[in-house]
Amino acid sequence: MAILETKKLVKTFDGFRALDELDLSVPKGAVYGLVGPNGAGKTTLIRHLAGILRPDSGEVLLDGSPVYENTEAKRRMAVIPDDVFYYTQASTADMMKFYKGVWSNFDVDRYEKLREAFTLDDKKPVRTLSKGMQKQAAFWLALSLRPEVLILDEPVDGLDPVMRRQVWSLVLADVAENGTTVLVSSHNLRELEDVCDHVGIMNRGKNLLERSLSELQDNVAKILIALPEGTELPKDLEMLHESATGRLRTLILRGRPEQLTDRLQILEPLFMDAVPLSLEEIFIYELGGADYAVKNILL
Amino acid sequence: MPSRTFCFNGLFRKDLARFWPIWAAYTILWFLLLPLTIISTLHVPFYTPDRIQEIVHTMMEVPAVLMAFFFAVLVAMAVFSYLYQGRSTNFFHALPVRRERQFLAHCASGLFLMLSANVVIFLLSLVVEAAGGCVDIVSLLQWLAVVSMCCVSFFGFAAFCAMLTGHILALPCIYVILQLAFVVAEALVQYILRFFTFGMSALGVRLLFLSPCPMLFRRLRWHGFYDPDTGELISQTFQGWGAACIYCAVGVVFLALALVLYRHRRMEASSDVIAIRVLKPVFRWCLAVAGALCVAALLCMILFESAGQMSGSLPGVLGIVFLLIGGFIGWIVADILLKKSFRVFRDHWKGFGIFAVIVIVLSLLCQHGAFGYEKRVPVPDDVTAVYLSADGDYATGVKLTEPENIAAAVALHESILSNESIHEANRSGETRNLVITYLDEEDNPILSRIYPLSASADQCRDRSSDVRLTERLLNSREALRSRCDSTIEVTPDSILNATLYYTYINESDEVIYYDGPFGETVTASTRPSDGSLTEQEAYELYTECILPDMEDGNMGRVWVIQDADYARSTINMELDIELMADAEDASNEPYEFEYLHFQIPASATRTVRWLEDHGYAPETLWDASEGNMDMYPLY
């Protein structure tokens, strides 16, 4: 069941259609990775989900209720944007007091417990901290809200590897213990692969595909094959990509790996192996079909 | 469910914590203006409590308006600063707080910053007065009321302006421009039309009510009336409560409008000069109009006023060109601001084309009198009075009410219009400006015009020319009487002061040279100097000489053409009498004043004889100038 949805969401900025009847469905308790090239509309989508922007048409729903100007819906959410705002000269403790004044469900005990996880001096003005530490402060405050939905835009950008692991473990612990739903937008597909169980791929304001990670990986196969001379591949194969090194060909095909290998077995290949694709490869080859060609640059 | 006031308080308190320096600056400035001034006055020897009252009430005038005007926009910039950066806009609108509540919280904090400071100053002043033993709580409460109303008025408008823009620096610009736009535009339009519309008069600023700041400057007035002998404050009055209340209410309306705009505001508009999409073309057109008026007024002033008037159709064509140049500049500047780029020359030409066509059509219509402005003359029956005034002489202005004089004024008006070509052709030559204003029963102007009447040699010779007709009408029996009569009864007690002075002294009489106090060379005439008359002397001169001379038609005359006739008919002395009496309606002012001015003709024999008998040496201007025909030509 979806906790966060958009239905035919449209947003235009000065004639440019940033979101083009976008449909999104984030299941409750999922860790949803939102991926897409630059300018796909991810940040614009996140701002709609956070209730900042008013859509031109379409709906943004949290548990079936519109989010825009809905204080109850917003109270259940926490948003960490890529560029976090703090009051000038405010420390993390000052921001905590402000959050406490706005969110009545702010958990001060949790804030104190998280002090051990985040190695920050919460009395120091946040603006004097490094970018990574500012991000840590943002996580510290957001997690203290105990939100039902956590929306993250490029969340681990600026964090060192140790802190990244720390942050993700805290987030996933909330997911596991409290059923928190997480939507995370990132370019770091390797990292998303480790944490996400659902993925949505955006391009040009549309959601191209939206699946669970396992379904996605089941739908595209990478097959290494060496065929006897004169043997042609079946023409009805949905080929996303093909490359060759000598007689060894690398095929990226749409379909279930087992079915594809069964079909190709008929050709009596000299060698054949199906290997799993990474999220990065799925992203590249899916978008390749959407006119976002990956250019081979020769230097 | 969490309390709604919970969130309100969080935002409200945060604003106060962040922007307390503005509160401090405002409070300190008011402290210097009011309590500190009271303290220093209390230490002045022989001060009176009246002086303290005067200080408090003076602070209700310009200082109240100026302080509210400047600090209102400063406070609005502070409390709404989060709207002008993407980061802060996103943060605040992701909070679980509805827009109305956000707006109300920030407005409340802004108003609190100013109004609480006013209360603090009120209390401090009260303490200071109590310490000095001269408590006047009524005056202080009046000050608090006026200042607070000004704060509400200007803050409401500033909040409204804050919603129009997405750029923090644009906010004060829009605020100041909108405060003055109507008044300035009206003045510029009237100024430009003067060059192209025959008879265009400065009608005064009719749209001043749309500019709260200058309007309040004019309306908030304290009058104190002091006994001339003891210097004691007899009575006082403060005017402007109505204006203050009205503008305060208007400020509240603007706050409501600002809330409506905020609820519909697109948050992606932060950093845009104009945040509301539908207002972008309006902004473009307004800037084009402003550019057209400013550039055209400047170029008209340089070309037509400094270089002299041009005749023919050339001024009209140039005027249109100036308007188009200015309009183009304004259009481009608007596009640059809206697009935040200098690459705007390729866009919106269609829009500017429409603007140019409108400018050309309107200008041509004005120049050719299509709106009927130039040819309009009122029907005499609709006119209760006519006010006439001409250049060339001091105090020619007169109000005529007799039907035959009104009819003569209308006939003169029609004659001027039929002789328009003569007057226009002589614009760069010798002219006399005639102001003619028709009034209705309530003394409201029906129609007002200024005509540059040709005063060329031919026109001056022709006794039936418009300039000579004007002079005759200004010297009608009714006009002479009105110049000599006084609404205040002239008695020795009502005469405040009277001065006789020479208007022309021959240069050859200035033979005394001496060093002045600063080392300069000073000259003095050997002739008898100007003199102040005693009340009795002035009364005697007025009742026994001036009034009988006036009955004979020999006093109160004015001259539009200063020719040889004028010089031979007028002596080189003038008389000023200032009168004062108790006001009939003492609720506003206890006294009323009137000034009488007399230019003395040579034919006022009684008056001339009195002057000679009292040691003055009057002579005609012609004799004094030794027949200087360059100064007084013979027609």
Image (cartoon, rainbow, N blue to C red):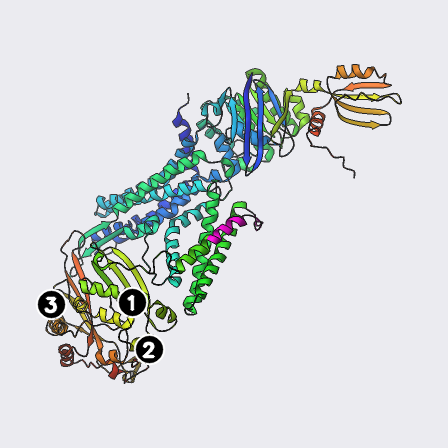
- Looking at the rendered structure, the secondary structure element under dot 3 is loop
Residue behind mark 3: B492
Let me know if residue B241 appears in the view. Answer: yes
Residue B71, percent from left and from top? 38, 46
**First of labels 2, 1 by sequence position:** 1
* Position above or below: A39 against A183: below
On residue B457, which mark appears?
A: 2
Residue B21 visible somewhere in the drawing: no
Which mark is first along the chain, 1 or 3? 1
Residue nearest the observer in this picture, B507 or B363: B363
Mark 2 surroundings within 10 Å by alpha-carbon count, few (fewer than 14), some (14 through 19), many (20 or more)? few
Q: Amino acid at mark 1?
A: Ser
Hey, what amino acid is under mark 3? Answer: Pro
Span colored in magenta: B340-357
Q: Is B321 left, or right, of B112 in this rendering?
A: right
- Taking B35 as reference, is A13 left or right? right
Q: Type of residue at label 2?
A: Ala
Chain of the residue that carries numbered disc 1 in the rendered image: B
Expressed as whole percent of the image width and height from the top left, the position of residue B518 reads: 34, 74
Number of marks drawn: 3
Q: Residue at x 25, y 43 (%)?
A: B141
Give the residue pinned by disc 1.
B415
Which percent across, then down, holds residue A157? 62, 31
| CA–CA distance in space, label 3 to label 1 | 46 Å
Contact between labelled residues 3 and 2, with CB atoms less than 8 Å apart: no
Which-is-in-front pick, marks 2 and 1? 1
Q: Say whether disc 2 or disc 3 marks the residue closer to the N-terminus.
A: 2
